Structures are given as C-alpha cells and as structure tokens.
Amino acid sequence: MNSKATGNVTSQTEITHISSHGVWLLTGDKELFMSYTDFPWFKDEPIGKVLNITEPTPGHFYWPDLDVDLGIESIEYPERFPFVVK
C-alpha cells in the first residue's frame, strides 16, 4: 500500500510586519524581531526589497535585492554577531 501526502505545506518564511523600530520575520512556528539597531540594512530600504526573502536552506535567510544573508542564530542572538563598520 502506498500512502499519499494529504494537503499542502503552508508554512513558509515571510516578513509579517515592518515598523519604525524594525522588521518581524515569521519562519515555521517562530516569529523573530530584527531591530534596525542590530540589522541596519533594512532601515531605509523600500518595502518590496525587504519583503523579497528566500530561505535557501533551513535557518538561512537571503534577501536577493539587498544582498543580505542571515542565519537564524544571528537573528535570535544579535549580540553574538555585532555589526561593525570599517
């Protein structure tokens, strides 16, 4: 007997909210907040570019229009990955 999968996978990674303080990212059952202080790449960008997100591998997020790559750990614990300007 063969079993067929029922239904469609509806879980996807998406930006759920953009505010003057930062960006909220929903992935699986987690909603993560990225403040502009810790993630300045998103602050002055057009909404369409921030919304265009992919998850090439689980827990790895990429914004192709911004050329920004972030791992879930760096979003959950930004203090471990300080932003440094040279």
Image: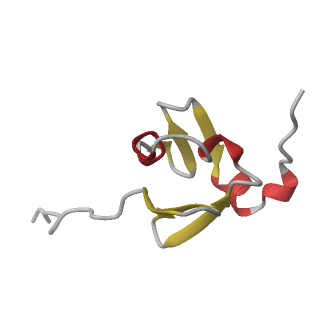
Give the tally of numbered discs: 0
Q: Position of residue 18 (x, y in %)?
A: 51, 60
Nearer-the-camera pick, 16 or 10: 16
In the rendered view, tell whether residue 53 sits above or below residue 3.
Answer: above
- Reply above or below: 31 against 67: below
- Please indicate whether residue 59 sits to the left or right of residue 80 in the image: left
Name the residue: 78% across, 56% down.
Answer: 78
Q: How is the image coloured?
A: secondary structure
Instruction: From the top left corner, tell me how far across and down residue 20 is, in percent.
Output: 60, 62
Q: Return the x and y of residue 13 as percentages of the image width and height.
A: 42, 56
Residue sitting nearer the eye, 77 or 7? 77
Q: Residue at left 45%, top 66%?
A: 28
Q: Residue furthest left?
A: 1
Q: Position of residue 67 (x, y in %)?
A: 57, 29
Which quadrant holds residue 7? bottom left
Quadrant position of the N terminus in the picture: bottom left
Q: Where's the C terminus, which quadrant? A: top right
Question: Residue placed at 27% from the left, 64% from the top?
Answer: 10
Q: Quadrant of residue 44?
A: top right
Looking at the image, residue 60 sits to the left or right of residue 40; the answer is left
Q: Quadrant of residue 76?
A: bottom right
Q: Residue at x 76, y 53 (%)?
A: 38
Viewed as shown, does residue 17 lie left or right of 80?
left
Q: Nearer the viewer, residue 4 or 81?
A: 81
